[in-house]
Image (spheres, rainbow, N blue to C red):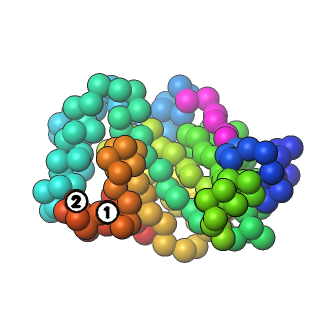
Amino acid sequence: MAGIHLPSEEEEQYWIHAQGDRQDYFEAHDVLRPKDTTANDVPESDNETVRGLDEEAHQHDSPTSLTGKWNVFLKPVEIDDVWDCVTGLVKENEIYAAKVSTKYGRKQENRENHVIVVYTPNYFDKDDVFRVRELLRNKCGVDETLYYKPDIYTRKGIYADTAQEMGLPGASRYSG
């Protein structure tokens, strides 16, 4: 295994993090830097609330205002191998950053499964967002439907049980 701490066994930390060279990531994958994003880069949507959230994210003056993540839910028996693959892709600068819930974190949340959170730096850059999803599929063997959630959704308290009341079709921006 790539790391000393296996998610399935870690009993002291809630999360294990992996981060690569963020500056090189933008250049290596021709990713649109959030600071260079214009109104023309806002992804299309037929939903008025989605468009409003995208506009708010674009106008927010923070380097992380456009970050988002694919959430990969896995059983304890699967987590270590997939996490090893993800951390390898982070080290190779193919993935921007990731974190995984540990045995401790899973128990604290009273959840049966772990989650690997795989970040991209700009959810408006759909090419990069879906390139990362394909890496998870082709390199790490993740074959279930994945859901991508911009961090603005999390900051606004948008979850599966609140999305509809907020005028959203779901708690994710992209899926597939």
Where are the magenta residues, as a range?
17-22
Place of residue 90 in the rendered image (x, y in percent of width and height, measured from the top left): 65, 42
Q: Residue at x 39, y 48 (%)?
A: 154
Q: Is residue 172 visible?
A: no
**Residue neighbourhood size for the residue with mark 2, other residues' Cα within 10 Å, grouped as few (<14), some (14–19), many (≥20):** some
Q: Residue 89: x percent and y percent? A: 66, 47
CB under 8 Å between callouts 2 and 1? yes
Relative side of 58 to 101, left or right: left
Q: Secondary structure at mark 2?
A: helix
Give amino acid for label 2.
Met
Inspect the magenta stretch and tell me whether residue 147 lies in it.
Answer: no
x, y percentage for residue 159? 38, 60
Which residue position is annotated with label 1?
A: 162
Give the quadrant of the C terminus: bottom left
> Does the image show residue 11?
yes
Residue 21 shown left or right of residue 129 in the figure? right
Q: Amino acid at mark 1?
A: Thr
100 or 127: nearer the eye?
A: 100
The one nearer the camera, 38 or 69, is 69
Label 1: few (<14), some or many (≥20) within 10 Å? Answer: few
**Helix or strand or loop: what does disc 1 sit on?**
loop
The residue singled out by tag 2 in the image is 166
Name which residue lies at 22% across and 59% down: 166
Vertical placement of residue 79 versus 27, above or below: below
- Residue 66 picture quarter: top left
On the picture, is 45 further left or further right than 101? left
Q: Is residue 164 above or below residue 43?
A: below
Q: Position of residue 62 (x, y in %)?
A: 35, 26
Q: Does the magenta segment cover residue 21?
A: yes
Q: Please name the residue shown 15% across and 62% down the image.
A: 46
